[in-house]
Image: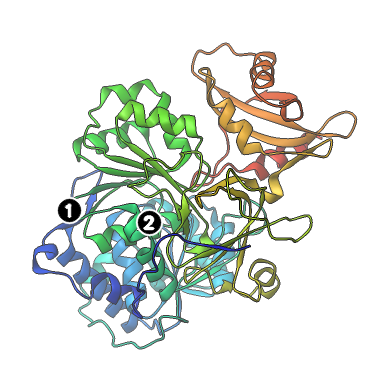
């Protein structure tokens, strides 16, 4: 049985992203800072940002970007990211955002698949970007280096070109705005086709729940090239006329310094950052009293970890759920929902409908009148659901059904209040003697150990060929923790079939830029040794 969002539907205007975000900016807001460079402190006002967006759009149109053409944006979080992203969209182009950690081969694959005709990058990333551009045939005069490099146009060149922003016309409901690539944690990265309506809808849907206001200063460390950063930080903050403090990468000292010195009020994180906020001694050396909310996404946040962060910083901690295919948010613990358990991802956002489906039988899970439902794969329908995967009808058909439901691949439960709990990835459940063991549950438990800095769990085959849980553990500095102690710690706290059977100590858990544990990398290293 399906269940709808408990929140009233919101109106979704039929506008382009540019017109939605910047079509009506008051004179007061024009002189507010939109972006602050965390390193230098340089400010970009809303007036300057809109001027830069229009200038980029004009220059791109003059250089041959037509409506529907794809431009790649390969950059860490810098203020110019916003100018370029929205300049591409303003010109009627489609922006494909490229992971700043990609090597030349990975960049080339995305450029080829997306058919990008322009590439924007920054000088520190130019070697791999240039190699990729040469490989796919993008000429040097279409490789724009934001901060300048010999032989390539710079952002300054585009801003001073003087070409007016073009008059463009397209249907926001069908015209592709962005083309992010799914993280590839469970397979080959695929281009996720998101329209202007998808992005506008998701900002409208989360606007009442997130509680961002124009008075907020938001620390933007989660990458804008990931859809979480693009929608929830960049677009949602700009829509509310808040101020974004950009950081090109996560560095704990810089993170704490910016949060303190820039008096940040709202911080969006992934669970690895929450671990540092809960456990690292450096945190106590900074004044974070202006922070009122920490919001976690991109991977499951353990309830005890969230509470530890809330207690240490004396702030609210919330979490949500989503995926690139959902633009990305589909569930969130609202700012006002103090009673909703932090072990959940909150309730479905406005204008959405959910189902839980038993992956073994295909039957819909019954909604409980009390307590919590049986687990099932979470299906989501709403205006934020992607059009499909670029050039991959088979993958689209596997993920989007005829009724418009997106099959998330995540196992969830729902309680009688409509609060949703993510159990684990369907494809990552460990099957031990026929029992399902969720890796995320064991990882959350391991993080409660005071001598554990980080952890990941996968299923491996033992000597009898049985799949068993194996924990990869990062010790806290100077900790003297043995594998037997880890095994005993878990065994005392879980059912027998969920016990960790093997432990390996490692220096760092491999994670995506958005903070997801790359279990496929751990499995690959196991396969190599096997």
Disc ID at residue 43:
1
Disc ID at residue 101:
none
The residue located at (56%, 32%) in the rendering is: 444
Q: Dividing the picture into quarters, in which one does residue 166 lie?
A: bottom left
Looking at the rendered structure, the secondary structure element under dot 2 is helix
Q: Residue furthest front?
A: 369
**Crowding near the residue tagged with mark 2, few <14, some 14–19, many ≥20 C-alpha atoms within 10 Å:** many
Looking at the rendered structure, the secondary structure element under dot 1 is strand
Q: CA distance from mark 2 to mark 1?
A: 21 Å
Question: Between 50 and 133, which is closer to the camera in this rendering?
Answer: 50
Nearest to viewer (mark 2 / mark 1): 2
- Colouring scheme applied when the structure was drawn: rainbow
**Crowding near the residue tagged with mark 1, few <14, some 14–19, many ≥20 C-alpha atoms within 10 Å:** some
Q: Is residue 11 left or right of residue 24?
A: right
Placement of 386 over or under 273, stated as above or below: below
Placement of 249 over or under 147, stated as above or below: above
Placement of 446 over or under 488, stated as above or below: below
| Badge 2 vs badge 1, beta-carbon distance below 8 Å | no
Q: Is residue 8 left or right of residue 480?
A: left
Q: Dividing the picture into quarters, in which one does residue 437 lie?
A: top right
Q: Dividing the picture into quarters, in which one does residue 494 lie?
A: top right
Q: Taking the image as drawn, is residue 151 in sight?
A: no
Q: Is residue 271 left or right of residue 210?
A: right
Circle 2 is placed at which residue position? 232
Q: Taking the image as drawn, is residue 327 in sight?
A: yes
The image shows residue 251 at horizontal and vertical percentages of 37, 36
Question: Between 313 and 281, which is closer to the camera in this rendering?
Answer: 313
């Amino acid at each position: 049985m399906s269940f709808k969002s408990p929140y009233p539907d919101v109106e979704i205007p039929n506008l382009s992203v540019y017109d939605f975000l910047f079509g009506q900016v008051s004179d007061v807001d024009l002189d507010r800072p939109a972006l602050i460079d965390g390193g230098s402190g340089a400010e970009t006002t809303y007036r300057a940002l809109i001027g830069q967006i229009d200038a980029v759009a004009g220059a791109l149109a003059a250089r041959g970007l037509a409506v529907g053409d794809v431009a790649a944006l390969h950059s860490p979080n810098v203020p110019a990211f916003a100018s370029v992203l929205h300049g591409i969209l303003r010109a009627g182009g489609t922006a494909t955002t490229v992971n700043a950690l990609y090597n030349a081969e990975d960049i080339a694959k995305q450029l080829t698949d997306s058919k990008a005709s322009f590439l924007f990058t920054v000088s520190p990333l130019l070697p791999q970007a240039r190699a990729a551009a040469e490989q796919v045939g993008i000429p040097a005069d279409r490789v724009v280096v934001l901060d300048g490099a010999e032989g390539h146009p710079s952002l300054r060149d585009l801003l001073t070109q003087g070409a007016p922003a073009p008059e463009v016309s397209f249907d926001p409901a069908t015209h592709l705005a962005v083309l992010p690539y799914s993280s590839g944690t469970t397979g080959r990265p695929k281009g996720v086709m998101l329209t202007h309506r998808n992005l506008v809808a998701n900002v409208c849907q989360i606007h009442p729940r997130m509680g961002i206001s124009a008075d907020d200063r938001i620390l933007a460390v989660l990458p804008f090239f990931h859809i979480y950063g693009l929608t929830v930080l960049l677009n949602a903050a700009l829509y509310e006329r808040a101020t974004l403090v950009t950081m090109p990468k996560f560095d704990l000292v810089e993170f704490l310094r910016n949060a303190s010195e820039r008096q940040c009020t709202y911080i969006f994180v992934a669970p690895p950052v929450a671990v540092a906020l809960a456990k690292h001694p450096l945190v106590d050396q900074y004044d974070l009293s202006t922070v009122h909310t920490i919001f976690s996404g991109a991977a499951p946040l353990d309830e005890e970890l969230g509470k530890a962060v809330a207690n240490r910083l004396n702030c609210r901690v919330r979490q949500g759920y989503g995926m690139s295919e959902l633009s990305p948010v589909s569930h969130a613990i609202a700012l006002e929902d103090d009673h909703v358990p932090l072990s959940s991802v909150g309730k479905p956002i406005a204008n959405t409908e959910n189902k839980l489906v038993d992956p073994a039988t295909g039957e819909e899970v019954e909604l409980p009148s009390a307590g919590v439902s049986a687990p099932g794969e979470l299906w989501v329908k709403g205006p934020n659901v992607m059009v499909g995967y670029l050039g991959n009808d088979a993958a689209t058909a596997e993920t989007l059904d005829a009724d418009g439901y997106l099959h998330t691949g995540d196992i969830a439960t729902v309680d009688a209040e409509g609060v949703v709990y993510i159990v684990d990835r369907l494809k990552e459940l460990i099957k031990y003697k026929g029992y399902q063991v969720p890796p995320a549950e064991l990882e959350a438990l391991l993080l409660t150990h005071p001598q554990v800095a980080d952890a990941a769990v996968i299923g491996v085959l033992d000597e009898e060929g049985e799949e068993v849980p194996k924990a990869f553990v990062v010790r806290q500095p100077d900790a003297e923790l043995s594998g037997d102690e880890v095994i005993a710690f878990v065994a005392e706290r879980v059912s027998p079939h969920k016990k960790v059977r093997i432990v390996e100590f490692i220096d760092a858990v491999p994670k995506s830029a958005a903070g997801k544990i790359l279990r496929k990398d751990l499995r690959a290293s196991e396969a190599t040794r096997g």
